[in-house]
């Protein structure tokens, strides 16, 4: 349904959204993460894979005596079986080398990223926010250099009030 709505918007010439889009650099961050594999990057596939990771994180942090004092971050990468590696985690201090049940990883600094804040259920990100980001990139001559990061800025019980910053690493589109 999300893809059909996006195609209908594109075919009718309707704007894909008025989501403010900005650019910035992203600092490197050390995360303790739980991971799983999704068959694709579509929200409908990622949602059921990422949701069970959060309880794993909360349990592992509690058992390790670690405070959760910064927003959670999700990131993606290709998996060996052709799917998408889905990683969800919380930042940890530089002196944390191990969290039982989780992997501690370093997300590298990103020199330039395009970002926008998605509001509401992540099931609608493909219609509500991502098109605005990609439209901005096309209009300004950029392309992505990798999968997105998601920073969960505010996660209240009312899912319509969730705020998630979508971050895509970008570079200038080569002319040619």
Image (cartoon, rainbow, N blue to C red):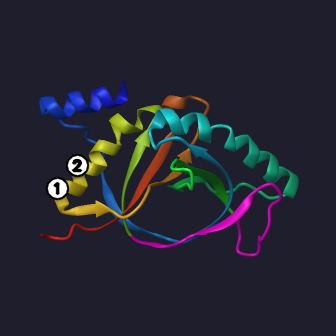
- Which secondary structure lies at badge 2? helix
Mark 1 is surrounded, within 10 Å at the Cα level, by few (under 14), some (14 to 19) or many (20 or more) other residues, namely: few
| Quadrant including the N terminus | top left
Task: Examine the image and state in which quarter residue 146 appears.
Answer: bottom left
**Which is nearer the eye, 124 or 83?**
83
Q: Which residues are magenta?
A: 92-111
Examine the rendered structure and indicate whether residue 94 appears above or below residue 64: below
**Which is nearer the eye, 174 or 129?**
174
The answer to whether mark 1 and mark 2 are in CB contact below 8 A is yes
- Which secondary structure lies at badge 1? helix
Q: Is residue 175 left or right of residue 124?
A: left
Q: Is residue 10 left or right of residue 56?
A: left
Residue 15: tell me if it is visible.
yes
Q: Picture coordinates of residue 52 (x, y %)?
A: 68, 38
| Quadrant including the C terminus | bottom left
Mark pair 1, 2: CA separation: 6 Å
Residue position marked by numbered label 1 in the rendering? 139
Residue at coordinates 57% horizontally, 56% vertically from top-left?
80
Any magenta on residue 95?
A: yes
Principal secondary structure, stretch drawn in magenta: loop
Examine the rendered structure and indicate whether residue 152 appears above or below residue 176: above
Q: Picture coordinates of residue 166 (x, y %)?
A: 43, 51
Q: Picture coordinates of residue 134 (x, y %)?
A: 27, 50
Residue at coordinates 73% horizontally, 49% vertically from top-left?
57
Q: Is residue 135 left or right of residue 89?
A: left
Residue at coordinates 53% horizontally, 72% vertically from top-left?
108
Mark 2 is surrounded, within 10 Å at the Cα level, by few (under 14), some (14 to 19) or many (20 or more) other residues, namely: some
Residue position marked by numbered label 2 in the rendering? 135
Task: Examine the image and state in which quarter residue 30 appears.
Answer: bottom right
Examine the rendered structure and indicate whether residue 25 appears above or below residue 35: below
Any magenta on residue 87?
A: no
């Amino acid at each position: 349904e999300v893809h059909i709505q996006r195609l209908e918007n594109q075919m009718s010439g309707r704007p894909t959204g008025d989501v403010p889009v900005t650019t910035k650099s992203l600092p490197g961050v050390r995360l303790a993460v739980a991971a799983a594999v999704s068959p694709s990057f579509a929200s409908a596939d990622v949602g059921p894979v990422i949701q069970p990771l959060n309880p794993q994180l909360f349990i592992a942090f509690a058992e390790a005596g670690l405070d959760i004092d910064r927003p959670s971050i999700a990131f993606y990468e290709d998996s060996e079986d052709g799917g998408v590696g889905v990683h969800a985690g919380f930042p940890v201090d530089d002196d944390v080398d191990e969290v039982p049940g989780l992997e501690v990883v370093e997300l590298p600094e990103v020199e330039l990223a395009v970002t926008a804040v998605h509001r509401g259920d992540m099931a609608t990100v493909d219609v509500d926010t991502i098109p605005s980001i990609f439209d901005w990139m096309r209009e300004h001559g950029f392309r992505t250099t990798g999968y997105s990061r998601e920073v969960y800025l505010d996660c209240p019980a009312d899912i319509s009030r969730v705020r998630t910053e979508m971050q895509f690493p970008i570079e200038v589109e080569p002319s040619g």
